[in-house]
Amino acid sequence: MIYCCQEHTELALDVMVDEYEKAPTIEKLKGETRPCEYCQNEAEYVVAN
């Protein structure tokens, strides 16, 4: 799973596709506050397989 902000969603998608070779799911975070794994801004999405 990759937690990311709006700006880094495309990067997270690319990383997941490269790593797992299949399309990941993207879900909007609700009620959670976590930092983006790329810039430390507040994450808005979780990208997972």
Image (cartoon, rainbow, N blue to C red):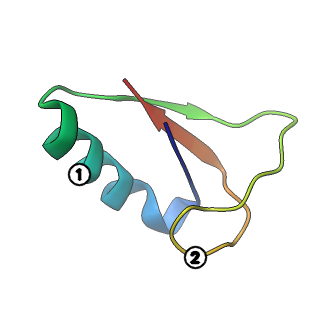
Q: Identify the residue shown where x is 49% and y is 36%.
A: 1
Please indicate whether residue 31 sits to the left or right of residue 9 in the image. Answer: right
Q: In which quarter of the view is residue 27 placed?
A: top right
Q: Which mark is residue 29?
A: none
Cα–Cα span, label 1 and label 2: 16 Å
Q: Position of residue 19 (x, y in %)?
A: 19, 41
Q: In which quarter of the view is residue 11 placed?
A: bottom left
Q: Identify the residue shown where x is 83% and y is 49%.
A: 33
Of the 4 image quadrants, the one containing the C terminus is: top left
Q: Identify the residue shown where x is 71% and y is 61%.
A: 35
Few, some or many C-alpha atoms within 10 Å of disc 1 (few <14, some 14-19, many ≥20)?
A: few
Above or below 8: residue 19: above
Give, as a three-letter code, the residue at label 1. Answer: Asp
Q: Secondary structure at mark 2?
A: loop
Badge 1 is on which residue? 14
Q: Which mark is residue 39?
A: 2
Q: Position of residue 14 (x, y in %)?
A: 23, 51
Q: Position of residue 6 (x, y in %)?
A: 54, 60
Above or below 10: residue 3: above
